[in-house]
Image: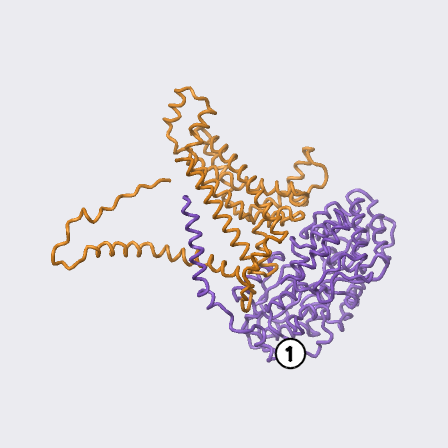
Chain colours: A orange, B purple
Amino acid sequence: MSTTLIPIAAPADRPPPRPGSGRRPGGLRRRRALTGLAYASPTAALVAVFFLLPIGLVGWMSLHRWPLLGQPEFNAPANYTAVPGDDLVRGAARFTVAYTVLMTAILVVVAVGLALLVQQRRRGVGFFRTAFLLPMAVGFATASLLFLGMLSDEIGPVTRALAALGIVDGYVSWTSGSATSASASAVVLVVWRFAGFTMLIVLTGLQAIPTDLYEAARLDGAGPWQTFRRITLPLLRRTLALVLTLTITGSLLAFDQFWILTRGGPDNSTTSLVMVLYRKAFIELDLGSAAAVSVLLLLVLVAVNVVQLGALRGRSR
Amino acid sequence: MTPRFGRRAAGGLAVALLLAPAACGADDPPGAVGTAGAARTAGVDDGSTLTLWTRAATESVSRAYAEAYNATHDNTVQVTAYPNEEYPAKLASAAGARALPDLFATDVVFAPQYASQGLWRDVTDSFAALAVKRAVAPAHVRAGTWRDRNYAVPHTIDMSVLLYNKELYARAGLDPARPPATLAEFAQHARRIDQLGGDVHGTYFGGNCGGCVEFTFWPSVWAAGGEVLTADGSASTVDSAEMAAVFSLYRRLYEDGVAAPASKDEAGPTWLGALKTGKVGIAPAPSVWLGLIEEAGVELGVAPITGIDGGESTFVGGDAIGIGATTGKAAQAWDFLAWTMSDEAQVEVVAKRKGVPTRTDLASNRYSSADPRIVTINRLMAKGRTPYAKNFNASFNDPQSPWLRTVRGALFGDTATALSEGNAAITRSLQQG
């Protein structure tokens, strides 16, 4: 993930402008700057229209009582001050943080494990790499529906298969029977769906580690665990930073798996922050409050990423 | 992948906040919505194409209306149905984008919210000019009213009734011609049938579904003279003795295994499927399921939902329909709405399909007399209620609603605490906004 910049020749290296040409020394520089701006402007415009403007609008909405139709009414900071007292938001925040910690730990461990398994070029390794990555080809909402059907006591094969093995007996509701089984259903779904993709990222990091380092370590008598701790992990740090960023961000924004699989239940035990946000916007039709929760969630995301990337970079220096 | 990402995002946020006022100033609506079409009272049939949105649950009725209307009119009504759970969000985003359809129906209990938000046009004057206005289902009309103006009219009617399996009644030694007259007797019958054993259960309910429980339990509260809401829908009264008695009865049925164990987790989607198996003795359920369950080969009896010691009531559910606030074809849309309330539509479309007419004066008609069970259902409308509250969905139907929390506590946790804490939480939710 490093780039090499080709140094642009400084103006001092160039021959001085011919006398009488009428061009000032700054002219070329400004032209180059303008050319640069012209190249960058399409992207800048896209970022402005599809990223900055919506964020700005959300921020603006969060300062208002914002009806679906009709005039917004300025009411700042009421939308923000109501957030800490909202039981649903508090419960969802606790659950979302716990889920993020659990999900990140599981995904990273599983992905690194899978990547180590299929790292070497061996017979049949291609099959496993493909198999691990294949769930990625199923859309996430579709995958959630698939699990809902599979885990259903009425139509799904899972309970029946477990009953045939004598593990469960009678009626079981995986997705809404208890808080633990509901969360576990979602965790299994996310691992199935995302472990392969995460593995792929780790795999690229692993393969970027020069093999001579391993050879040198082996000559020095390092065992597999020492090699993993002293060589693989430190050199994988930047890759892991990327994995952590993606996983933590994804988990803090969790929605589909809970919306489809558990509906936030039982008893709000799997209600994520984005579900609360959705409820505020589309059920309570309180767009201002929904915007306020979005802004707070955005700030948390930015803060988490700054801290995390800062820490990972700092240590690798 | 550097810390700069964070700083850039925060910087961008600040810049965007400064820019935003300019961006949304242009977006403001041009004055009040919903009054423009009110002056015109007559419908127009000029060959326009009208879009109509509805939820999947009542799609078949909307389609039947549209088919009959299209066959006899120049206008064409096109029906689009959305999954029940996703429908409110679909409407909200369409409203936000000012792209509502010409006509849209909604679960009648959500009507006060949409009326108060101005999502429908004001149809007060057109409706007042309609000759049959006085006979149009009063509970539904009230639901579509906001600050004394009418925004929606009834589209379909669905009432909660007791459906019982006649074959299981006979097998358990009960008289299939004599349904329970009180809720206490309902419980006795359920217990008798449950004793048949095997995979037969006495009863079934949607214990993880706020909408299912209000639809099936509240009539028992009303029948006993209790209330669940104040008349203006601004406060909850679910901590009443009547409500506690109803919960306690169902709670014992669940604890004793008389209610199928799946009742605890039933969130709605598999409710109909469970009754279709023919393994449930007697259960409160939507009247429109009568035909659907009998198609599966289960012979059913119909009885009113009763209070603990007698009395009868029903939850008058179904869909209300109004004209989208952002449409330019209000007069054409009204032509369709006025037609749906006509004798022709109510008898030849609704009653013919064994539905409940939206007009009280058509409760007995040439189709209903063929099946005494339909007469039982139609007769109930006069005794039934449609609860009215602006924040109904957020307070009662949504999976994250305080009512569902209350239900779960009352049925499977500490009943007294659940009802008192739940009552306060529901009132807070009702008064929000």
B400 vs A127: above or below: below
Position of residue B290 measured from the top left corner of the image (x, y, whole percent): 74, 58
Position of residue A176 measured from the top left corner of the image (x, y, whole percent): 66, 45
Residue at 51% over, 48% down: A300
* Figure disc tally: 1
B340 vs B301: above or below: below
Q: Nearer the viewer, residue B175 or A147?
A: A147
Amino acid type at image mark 1? Asp
Position of residue B384 measured from the top left corner of the image (x, y, whole percent): 77, 65
Snapshot quadrant of residue B68:
bottom right
Classify residue B284 as left or right of residue B17: right
Position of residue A240 measured from the top left corner of the image (x, y, whole percent): 45, 37
Locate the C terminus of chain B and report the quarter of the image it occupies: bottom right
Classify residue A304 as left or right of residue B354: left
Q: Nearer the viewer, residue B395 or B271?
A: B395
Please rate how many residues cluster around mark 1, counting C-alpha atoms within 10 Å: few if below 14, some from 14 to 19, many from 20.
some
Numbered disc 1: what chain? B
Name the residue beneath numbered marker 1. B125
Hey, which residue is sitting farthest left in the picture? A19
Q: Nearer the viewer, residue A248 or B372?
A: A248
Residue at 15% over, 49% down: A15
Residue at 64% over, 39% down: A158
Q: Secondary structure at mark 1?
A: helix
Locate the N terminus of chain B and report the quarter of the image it occupies: top left
